[in-house]
Amino acid sequence: MKLSHQINSLYLFHLLSRKTLSTSASTSTSPSLSSVALFWDLKSIPPTSTYRRLSLYDISVRLRLAAASFGHLLSPSLAFSSPSHRISPSPPLQPPFRCRLCGRAFPSHQTLTHHFTSVHSPEHERRLQRLGSATGRRLCILSGQLSLNLSRYEKAYRELFGRCENAIDEVKRAGFRVLVGGDKTVHLCRELENQQRVKFAVIVSDDLEFVRVLIKMRRKGVKSVVIGELKGDNGIKRHGDVGFCWREVLGGKVKEEGPKVVARWREKELLERLEWRYDPRQDDKEELLSTENTGEEKAKGKPWWKLDNGFSNQEC
Ligand SMILES: [Zn+2]
C-alpha cells in the first residue's frame, strides 16, 4: 500500500475521532461548560472476558468518549503506569481471519491483508476522489452518503494495520499523556490544582490510595466518577459520587448516562442554593430595626396605628 494513502487514511480517521469527541462534549455540556479531568491508573484495565476482542487503543478511545459525556474533556488525559507494571499488548488476531468489511474468512493474516489492500483500499480511494472532485450541494449529499462507508473502512484499516507492539504507545495514540513512576495520587492532585476550572473528575482505578483524594475533592466541590471492577470495601467506587464498571464503559452505557448524571447534580446544587437556612445574624439585624422604629414612635408620643391629627382634620 502506498505510504501517502496510509497517511491520508490515518489523518482522516484522526479528524473523525476528534470531531466525535468534540461533538459529544458540546451536546452534553450545555448550558454552562464544565471541565472534566480523566485520570487512568493503567493497573485497572478491563477483564479479559470483556476486552478480548478490543485493542487497547479502542478501549482508550471508548474511555475518553465516556468521560466526554460529563462535560468538556481536558486534553490530553492523564494515564499512570509504574515502571514495574507490564501492560499486556493488544490481543493478537485469531483465525479465522475475517474481513470486517465484507465478512469473508481467510486462512492467514497475510491473505487477509492482501484481500484488504487489493479490494477495499481501491474502493476507498475512489470514494475519496469522488469527494475531492465534488463541490457545493453535491459535496454535502455525497458526504452524507459516503460517511458510513468511510468510517467503516477507517475502523477496519486501523484494526488491521494500526496496531502497536507497545501498549503504552496505543494509549498515547488515543490522546493520553502517560506518566511512568512517582506517586499516582500526587500526579492526580497536581493535575486538579493546575486545571482551575475542573468541575468533574473521572478516575479509573481500584486502588484504595485514591480514597483520600476523593474525600479532598468532595470538600472542594469537585464531583467524582469512579470506574473500577472491585465492589464493596475492596474497591473505591463507593467513595465516589457515582461509580461504573468497565463493561458499562465499553458498552456505551456511561456515554448515555453521563449527561443525565450531570443534570441530576446540577438540580441538587440549585435546590441546595435555594433552600432556606436559619441565619442568626439576620435575626439580630431585624431586632435592631424594630427597636429603632419603636424609638421613633415613642418620640412622637403615640402608637404607630394612630393617624396624624392633620390628616384626620382634613378628612373630617
Ligand atoms: Zn473484504
Image (cartoon, rainbow, N blue to C red):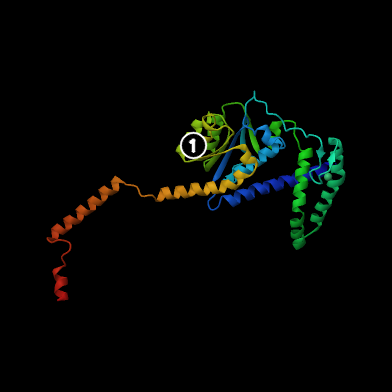
Whether ligand 1 has any atom under 8 Å from the Cβ at mark 1 is answered as no
Where in the figure is residue 150, as x and y percent of width and height? Answer: 77, 50
The answer to whether residue 129 is left or right of residue 265 is right
Residue carrying label 1: 217
Residue drawn at point x = 81 percent, y = 35 percent: 95
Q: In terms of depth relative to the viewer, which is nearer, 180 or 161? A: 161
The answer to whether residue 46 is left or right of residue 222 is right
Asked whether the viewer can see residue 94, the reply is: yes
The answer to whether residue 26 is left or right of residue 8 is left
> Which quadrant would residue 280 be assigned to in this image?
top left
Outermost residue to the left:
301
Q: In terms of depth relative to the viewer, which is nearer, 40 or 156? A: 156
Count the labels in the image: 1
Q: In terms of depth relative to the viewer, which is nearer, 258 or 300? A: 258
- Three-letter amino acid code of the residue under disc 1: Met
Instruction: Identify the image quadrant of the C terminus.
Output: bottom left
Where in the figure is residue 168, as x and y percent of width and height? Answer: 69, 32
Q: Quadrant of ligand 1?
A: top right
Say what secondary structure mark 1 lies in: helix
Bin the neighbour count of mark 1 within 10 Å (Cα to Cα): few under 14, some 14-19, many 20 and up.
some
Instruction: Identify the image quadrant of the N terminus.
Output: top right
Figure check: 295 above or below 183: below
Asked whether the viewer can see residue 71, the reply is: no
Residue drawn at point x = 69 percent, y = 39 percent: 58
Outermost residue to the bottom:
316
Residue drawn at point x = 53 percent, y = 47 percent: 262
Where in the figure is residue 44, as x and y percent of width and height? Answer: 62, 31
Residue drawn at point x = 67 percent, y = 48 percent: 20
